[in-house]
Structure formats: structure tokens, C-alpha cells
Image (cartoon, rainbow, N blue to C red):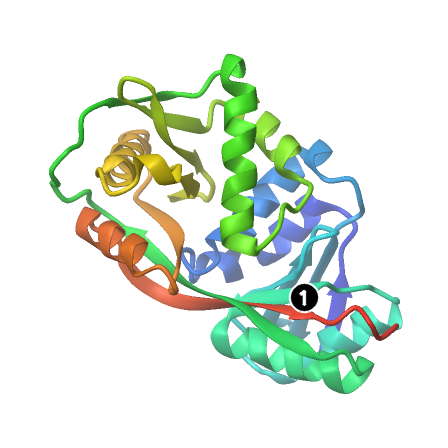
């Protein structure tokens, strides 16, 4: 078993693409980040951690990190790879805020990291990956889908920060850069009624799929069907552009979002957990 690290995102993608595409919907997040690293590297300030673990010339695990974010793990074929990744990150003095991945993979890494570093771990979020191949008809709310504009920057930044607080417990500090990127790439959409009432980002993120998220509706506009209509219309927009499917994450702690996306046509393909690591123990 050998671990390989990559400096160049394009070379990394060429090595991992077949492995990631074999479970494309499960790996939509990793594939989307690869796309961004290659096409828009300015989004990230620090050198990314890009690694494979291989056995007999075959990939058994892929890991990625764009600091200061958590480590991301692919589906892992042999869990001995988890120990190899944790040892490599520890050897290179990487300070990890946490890990994200499929349920078994993320938990295995959290345990390995605690064993090596003494840092405890805590489950932050339990998420579900959904995939849609065809938009199901729903009762459409009043309004229509349109692109967000630079003139709405301050409003949308407030919404971005509110989403981060609800989803992650705090503003992460990357909201401005993410918003500027989505506006510049025409990938941020608004559901417009008499006023803007909901937003969703959506883009072609993999060779065959579109990615939707984040999705946010201010509290005063909720329970009116705006988010459902926004995501349904955006999903159809991506399918019309040639995507074979769309995928998104939902929070299992939010039964409302899980229900409304299922009504649109999204179906579960896997579960995904986020863990945080304590910061009181130095590596």
C-alpha cells in the first residue's frame, strides 16, 4: 500500500477521475472541488492537500483538503488507507479542523486521528446525499427563477452568512469569496416574488451531473413553497443544459428540507458526516 501526494490539481484529477466517477453522485463534492482547483484556483489561498492511497496500482482511497476547511474523503475500498492518510497528515504537521466523508469513512478517520494526535472528535453534522434524474411536478409558488446580480451583493452576503450560521454554527470567513465567485460565474439564482425570497447556487460540477447548494430562504419567507420552487426550477435548468442528474446535500436534522426535496424527485444515494477535532491539543 502506497500513499501518493499531488501538487498539481490537473495531474491529481487525471489520476483519480475514473475512481471518483465510478460513484459519481457520492463524489460530487470532491469532483466539484477538483473542477474549481483546475479552473478557478484563485478561490483558494493555500496549497491543497491532494492524495491517493493505492494498492497493486489501484486506488483504494482519495483525500482532499483546501485549507482551512476539513479533510474530505472518498468512498474507501480498504480501511487500512485511513491509517496511512492520518499518519501522512500528522507527519507533515497538518492542523486539521475536522473530517468529512461517508459515514463509515469519516468515523474511521476521526478515530485514527484521535489515536495518533490525542485530539478528540465531535460529530457536527449528519447529512444525506440526494440525486435527481427527473424533476417531479409540484405545486409551484408564486414567482420565478432568475440569476442573482451584483446589485444584490449586500443582501446575498447577509443570506450567505445566515446560511453558514444555521448550517455550521458560525460564519466561516469564506462567504465573501464564495459569493463573488458564484456571481461572477452566473451560478447563483434567486426565486423572485414581489421581492427576492430564496436563493440557490447551481452549476455543472461533474462530467454528468449538476450540483445544487447552498440553498437558503430567510425565516420570514419560509413555509410558502419558495425553496421547493427554486430548487425544482434550478434542477430543471441544469438538466436542460445536459446534466444527466443533479445532486445536493440535506441536513438530517431538518426533516422539512428532506421532505421537500424528495417531493421534487431527489432520492438518497448515501449518508455523509462532518466531524470536528478539538483545538486544545497540539499535533
Q: Is residue 68 left or right of residue 194?
A: right
Count residues near mark 1 (Cα–Cα under 10 Å), then give few for <14, some for 14-19, many for 20+: many
Q: Quadrant of the N terminus?
A: bottom right
> Does residue 204 sit above or below 275 in this rendering?
above
Instruction: Kindly give the residue lying farthest to the top in the view shown.
Output: 151
Which residue is rendered at x = 56% and y = 29% of the image? 157
| 82, 61: nearer the viewer | 82
Give left or right: position of 131 versus 134.
right
Q: How many marks?
A: 1
Foreground residue, 145 or 156?
156
Q: Is residue 63 left or right of residue 19?
A: right
Residue at screen point 37% across, 40% down: 219
Q: Nearer the viewer, residue 5 or 255?
A: 255
Q: Quadrant of residue 198?
A: top left
Residue 40 place in picture, x, y as percent:
65, 32
**Residue visible at 74% across and 72% down in the picture:** 278
202 w.r.t. 94: above or below: above
- The x, y position of residue 254, in whole percent, is 35, 59
Q: Quadrant of residue 122?
A: bottom right
Image x and y of residue 172, in percent: 66, 47
SS class of the residue under badge 1? strand
Between 196 and 135, the one lying in front of the other is 196
Q: Is residue 98 visible?
A: yes
Q: Which residue is mark 1?
A: 98
Query: Which residue does the image show at 24% across and 48% down from the upper left?
Result: 133
Specify whether residue 55 is in view.
no
Residue 162 spot, x, y in % from top left: 52, 41
Amino acid at each position: 500500500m502506497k500513499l501518493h501526494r499531488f501538487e498539481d490539481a490537473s495531474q491529481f484529477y487525471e489520476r483519480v477521475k475514473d475512481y471518483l466517477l465510478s460513484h459519481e453522485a457520492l463524489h460530487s463534492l470532491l469532483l466539484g472541488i477538483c473542477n474549481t482547483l483546475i479552473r478557478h484556483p484563485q478561490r483558494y489561498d493555500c496549497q491543497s492537500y491532494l492524495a491517493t492511497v493505492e494498492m497493486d496500482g489501484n486506488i483504494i482511497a482519495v483525500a482532499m483538503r483546501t485549507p482551512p476547511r476539513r479533510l474530505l474523503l472518498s468512498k474507501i475500498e480498504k480501511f487500512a488507507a485511513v491509517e496511512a492518510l492520518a499518519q501522512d497528515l500528522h507527519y507533515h504537521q497538518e492542523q486539521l479542523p475536522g473530517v468529512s466523508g461517508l459515514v463509515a469513512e469519516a468515523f474511521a478517520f476521526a478515530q485514527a486521528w484521535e489515536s495518533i494526535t490525542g485530539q478528540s472528535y465531535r460529530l457536527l453534522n449528519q447529512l444525506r446525499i440526494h440525486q435527481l434524474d427527473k424533476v417531479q411536478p409540484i405545486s409551484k409558488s408564486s414567482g420565478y427563477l432568475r440569476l442573482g446580480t451584483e446589485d444584490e451583493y449586500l443582501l446575498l452576503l447577509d443570506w450567505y452568512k445566515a446560511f453558514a450560521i444555521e448550517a455550521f454554527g458560525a460564519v466561516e470567513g469564506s462567504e465573501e469569496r464564495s459569493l463573488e465567485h458564484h456571481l461572477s460565474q452566473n451560478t447563483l439564482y434567486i426565486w423572485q416574488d414581489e421581492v427576492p425570497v430564496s436563493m440557490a447556487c447551481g452549476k455543472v460540477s461533474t462530467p454528468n451531473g449538476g450540483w445544487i447548494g447552498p440553498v437558503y430562504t430567510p425565516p420570514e419567507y419560509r413555509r410558502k413553497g419558495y425553496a421547493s420552487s427554486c430548487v425544482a426550477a434550478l434542477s430543471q435548468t441544469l438538466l436542460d443544459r445536459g446534466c444527466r442528474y443533479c445532486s445536493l446535500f440535506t441536513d438530517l436534522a431538518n426533516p422539512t428540507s428532506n421532505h421537500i426535496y424528495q417531493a421534487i424527485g431527489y432520492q438518497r444515494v448515501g449518508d455523509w458526516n462532518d466531524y470536528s477535532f478539538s483545538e486544545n491539543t497540539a499535533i
